[in-house]
Amino acid sequence: MTSLYSEGAPALSADPSAPFWTDAPRVRSQADQYGRPVPGYELEVRSRWTKQDLYLLFICHHQSPLYLKPNPSQTTETNELWNWDVAEAFIGDDFKQIEQYKEFEVSPQGEWVDLAINRLPHSTELGVRWNSGFEVKAKTNPGGGVWYGEMRIPFSAISKAAPHDGLELRANFYQMQGELPDRKQIAWQPTYSSTFHVPKAFGRIRLETQPR
């Protein structure tokens, strides 16, 4: 997918109709991590970038009722947020040591968690103890059926290189929706595994200054 440059850095809105997001590049998926269709569910991800940050907007269509964590916190990190409804981004800049990447999550309630992942043997990964400084915003549709999550991720947290036209990052995006045993999982790039943590299956984000 591509991410389109923006001179301005607006406040997070989680609003797909905002001018910042209207013409943003996007990808969509209606399939699970095995590539199987999931009727009634769709993940759409849009992206913009600035000289400081990568922006992602998740549009999560669903049929099941929202499965939300009781007593949510929007001011402190929520470990194991993935047990509830979330949108996730896995992003890495290393095309050789692909087992090292970062994980970012946002819930429909505006909860968040970020993790440093290192799946190399004998690694001393930071996991949830890592802090990227990213920000999130979320909102739900009063009529149901869709929720929105926005992330603003500092480039210093995901890349050793300064952001520039043509820079590529490795990434995958996911949506997890509903309660077990009927939990639905949507993946941008299929992993063909029960886990999302399959870095060889990641796609790419390419930064561009001009729309295609």
Image (cartoon, grey):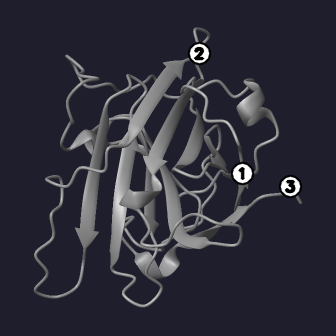
The residue drawn where x is 23% and y is 50% is 131
Q: Secondary structure at mark 1?
A: strand
Q: Quadrant of the C terminus?
A: bottom right
Quadrant of residue 147 within the rendered picture: top right
Using a 10 Å C-alpha cutoff, classify the residue at mark 2 as few (fewer than 14 neighbours), some (14 to 19) or many (20 or more): few
> Label 3 belongs to which residue?
211
Quadrant of residue 103 within the rendered picture: bottom left
Q: Which numbered disc, 2 or 3, marks the residue closer to the eye?
A: 3
Foreground: 191 or 11? 11
Discs 3, 1 touching: Cβ within 8 Å: no
Residue 10 left/right relative to 176? right
Instruction: Residue 75: give its label.
Output: none
Instruction: Residue 141: give its label.
Output: 2
Q: Amino acid at mark 2?
A: Asn
On screen, residue 49 above or below 201: above
The percent coordinates of residue 27 (x first, y second) are 71, 54
> Label 1 belongs to which residue?
5
Q: Amino acid at mark 3?
A: Pro
Foreground: 4 or 173? 4
The residue drawn where x is 60% and y is 49% is 38
The percent coordinates of residue 67 (x first, y second) are 36, 27
Using a 10 Å C-alpha cutoff, classify the residue at mark 1 as few (fewer than 14 neighbours), some (14 to 19) or many (20 or more): many
Q: CA distance from mark 3 to mark 1?
A: 9 Å
The percent coordinates of residue 14 (x first, y second) are 57, 26
Regarding residue 161, the answer to whether it shows in the image is yes
